[in-house]
Image: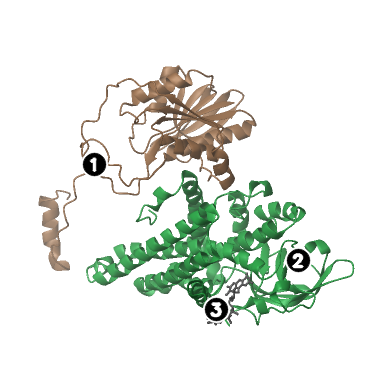
């Protein structure tokens, strides 16, 4: 049975539990049997996309009128938790599609853009990617040098390079963030909907990844890419627009990390009960019990943080700084749990047949993307002291 | 095609059960509940039948306290059209009482097929479906593992101990579903949202007192701990002796 030591289920609505249970079964039946191989081969399991779309997992918290499921944020979080219990790469795929591509089109797009793109993205017909990070601007995206210039006829020409872009190679559309018209100030940043078959657009797979291997990560190059005037997201403006997307995605990641942690803890627990050494199950030794007790405690704390954050988000009163705390805490605890679980599994723990080391390696990406652990530390530091330690 | 499906709320079985203080019921603290597996396959069979014939209605019935609405809504989220709760403090132990209450309700409409699961995994009586058939005066085919319905007649397969049996029957009919008939669909998120808006009627169950009662419940006896007789070839004679004299299996 799933880890629910504090009966969190009793704080969930029937509908939230129903959503979680459906996704849980999907992950158990369709993700678990294939994910170890996909990871070793370094391939995102594309065959899962139609099923994920049919279940309604893409952009699930966006409104029904755009073909989405219209769920609340807690149900959305539970989806992320279950997907990442499978693999961070699967959750990343859904996060990017929903929170980083569909969300900005929903929040900053025109009515026509929403009607055109969102239903096809919810149905998985169109996959998207989100291009913010650049080779020289990671933690500090305000320094970006990708530039869009408006032409006389109102169309745009974009030049620049984006790095570490999830879904980059399989995407049909990219939401690209660029400064505009030669203005180096971050306030000139706008979002553009760029079809990936546009002339001058190339995506190259990032090779040699030792983490998040069951996910596409690419480098995008935009060389005089010409897009029409209606490619711009009209309501986007300044760095705060992409940061709003990241707040959405980070919220989901705080839940996702819980899923990875639960997956590792449950694997370690079941191993501890069956692996016999010195004549008894290793779970009978105090050292291993301490490990399990620590894991369980951290998971329960993380569950309470994410659940309450979700309730605040549904009430419309959450702050980005609260999201930073949740992302920072939950991802960090998940990296620790994954490592401890891997160790409890002994030699078996290094095999792809078990999940813990895969999660352990994956979570290093999750620790780094969407604001590194350090960056969230500084955000919290600034929130409580009022002093900016970034610059 | 008008199709009824009767479903039961049962505890999820992956826990250690405890007997309640009264000594004759299960301690419900910490239990989680779901639709009885066999009933989920019955819902799936009903939905497939409706989809195949292209019209009709699938109505889900469940007898019990308000908590059973959660299981009815699960069936609605899979695609059933509406639900009916026959409200009772608890499902009684006597399957005939349950069957009478369901039959009284089902009698009010004409059904082409009434589906049940073969067995409820908690009480394991295997009798409510056939009893309802009897009370409605309908033919009953129990434990079906395949089903084909066309032109007012049906064919089903039943798995026996070491053979299977093919039976034919006219409609209307009561069918109880065995494992292997299908695999139930997962409710998708839109279905879960839509289920909230589908009609779910609550009526009092017409329950009689029943004549069968549970008087006591016991857990299986703890198995005695194993005994190590010795090691290697030297221990074999003693082992053989004990297997003959004590275990009496040789
Ligand atoms: C698998 C993967 C997928 C990704 N997917 C996407 C995507 O889809 N779209 C996208 O736009 N980006 C994506 N990213 C990029 C990701 O957001 C960046 O890697 C991240 O922002 C960190 O940037 P960087 O790698 O340039 O590291 P840097 O910013 O160079 O950081 C290096 C180190 O310095 C620390 N550091 C930086 N600044 C400070 C400071 N002021 N004070 C203290 N320490 C500091 C960091 O914490 C880190 O430890 C992805 C990354 C990975 C690994």
Q: Position of residue A304 (x, y in %)?
A: 41, 59
- Please report the residue visible at 53 percent of the width from the left and 52 percent of the height from the top: A315
Q: Chain of mark 3?
A: A
Q: Which mark lies nearer to you, 1 or 2?
A: 2
User: Pointers 3 and 1 in contact (CB under 8 A)?
Assistant: no
Q: Is residue B102 above or below residue A288?
A: above
Residue A219 lies left or right of residue B100; in this view the side is: right
Question: Residue A227, located in which quarter of the rendered image?
Answer: bottom right
Say what secondary structure mark 1 lies in: loop
- Please report the residue visible at 54 percent of the width from the left and 40 percent of the height from the top: B77
- Residue at the right extreme? A152
Q: Position of residue A232 (x, y in %)?
A: 77, 64
In the rendering, which numbered label is found on residue B19? 1
In the rendering, which numbered label is found on residue A388? 3
Instruction: Tell me what hue chain A is rendered in.
Output: green
Q: Quadrant of the N terminus of chain B?
A: top right
Q: Quadrant of ligand 1?
A: bottom right
Q: Position of residue A22 (x, y in %)?
A: 50, 49
Judge whether residue A138 can be spotted in this image: yes
Residue assigned mark 2: A194
The residue lying toward the viewer, choosing from A343 and A8, is A8
Q: Is residue A245 above or below residue B89?
A: below
């Amino acid at each position: 049975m799933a880890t629910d030591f504090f009966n969190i289920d009793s704080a969930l609505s029937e509908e939230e539990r129903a959503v979680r249970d459906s996704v849980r079964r999907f992950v158990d039946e369709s993700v678990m049997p294939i994910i170890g191989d996909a990871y070793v081969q370094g391939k995102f399991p594309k065959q899962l996309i139609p099923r994920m779309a049919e279940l309604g997992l893409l952009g699930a918290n966006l409104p029904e009128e755009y073909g989405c499921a219209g769920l609340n944020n807690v149900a959305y979080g539970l989806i992320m938790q279950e997907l990442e219990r499978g693999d961070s790469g699967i959750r990343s795929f859904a996060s990017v599609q929903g929170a980083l591509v569909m969300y900005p089109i929903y929040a900053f797009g025109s009515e026509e853009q929403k009607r055109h793109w969102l239903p096809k993205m919810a149905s998985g017909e169109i996959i998207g990617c989100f291009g913010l990070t650049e080779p020289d601007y990671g933690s500090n995206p305000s320094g970006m040098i990708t530039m869009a210039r408006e032409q006389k006829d109102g169309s745009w020409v974009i030049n620049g390079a984006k790095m570490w872009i999830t879904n980059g190679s399989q995407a049909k559309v990219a939401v690209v963030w660029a400064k505009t018209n030669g203005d180096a100030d971050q306030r000139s940043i706008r979002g553009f909907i760029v079809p990936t078959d546009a002339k001058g657009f190339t995506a190259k797979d990032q090779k040699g990844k030792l983490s998040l291997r069951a996910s596409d990560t690419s480098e995008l190059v935009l060389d005089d890419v010409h897009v029409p005037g209606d490619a711009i997201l009209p309501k986007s403006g300044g760095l705060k627009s992409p940061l709003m997307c990241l707040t959405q995605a980070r919220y989901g990641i705080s839940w996702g990390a819980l899923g990875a942690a639960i997956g590792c803890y449950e694997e370690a627990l079941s191993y501890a009960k069956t692996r016999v050494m010195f004549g008894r199950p290793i779970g009978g030794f105090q050292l291993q019990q301490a490990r399990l007790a620590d894991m369980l405690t951290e998971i329960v704390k993380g569950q309470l943080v994410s659940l309450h954050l979700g309730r605040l988000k549904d009430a419309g009163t959450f702050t980005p700084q609260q999201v930073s705390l949740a992302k920072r805490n939950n991802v960090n605890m998940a990296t620790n749990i994954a490592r401890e679980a891997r160790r409890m599994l002994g030699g078996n723990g290094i095999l792809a047949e078990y999940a813990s080391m895969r999660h352990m390696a994956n979570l290093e990406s999750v620790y780094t993307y969407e604001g590194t652990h350090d960056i969230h530390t500084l955000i919290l530091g600034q929130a409580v002291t009022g002093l900016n330690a970034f610059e | 095609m008008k199709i009824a499906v009767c479903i039961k709320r049962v505890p999820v079985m992956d826990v250690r059960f405890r007997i309640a203080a009264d000594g004759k019921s299960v301690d419900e603290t910490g239990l989680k509940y779901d639709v009885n597996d066999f009933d989920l396959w019955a819902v799936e069979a009903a939905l497939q039948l409706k989809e195949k014939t292209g019209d009709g209605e699938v109505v889900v019935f469940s007898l019990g306290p308000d908590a059973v609405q959660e299981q009815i809504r699960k069936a609605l989220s899979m695609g059933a059209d509406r639900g009916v709760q026959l409200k009772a403090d608890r499902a009684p132990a006597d399957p005939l009482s349950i069957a009478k209450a369901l039959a009284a309700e089902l009698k009010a409409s004409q059904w082409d097929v009434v589906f049940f699961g073969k067995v409820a995994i908690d009480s394991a009586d295997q009798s409510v479906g056939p009893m309802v058939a009897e009370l409605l005066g309908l033919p009953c085919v129990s434990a079906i593992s395949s089903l084909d319905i066309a032109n007012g007649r049906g064919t089903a397969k039943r798995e026996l101990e070491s053979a299977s049996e093919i039976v034919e029957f006219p409609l209307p009919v009561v069918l109880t579903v065995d494992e292997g008939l299908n695999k139930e669909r997962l409710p998708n998120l839109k279905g879960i949202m839509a289920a909230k808006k589908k009609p779910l009627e609550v009526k009092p169950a017409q329950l009689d007192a029943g004549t069968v009662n549970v008087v006591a419940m016991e857990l299986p006896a703890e198995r005695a701990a194993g005994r190590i007789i010795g090691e290697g070839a030297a221990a074999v004679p003693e082992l053989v002796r004990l297997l003959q004299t004590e275990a009496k299996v040789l």
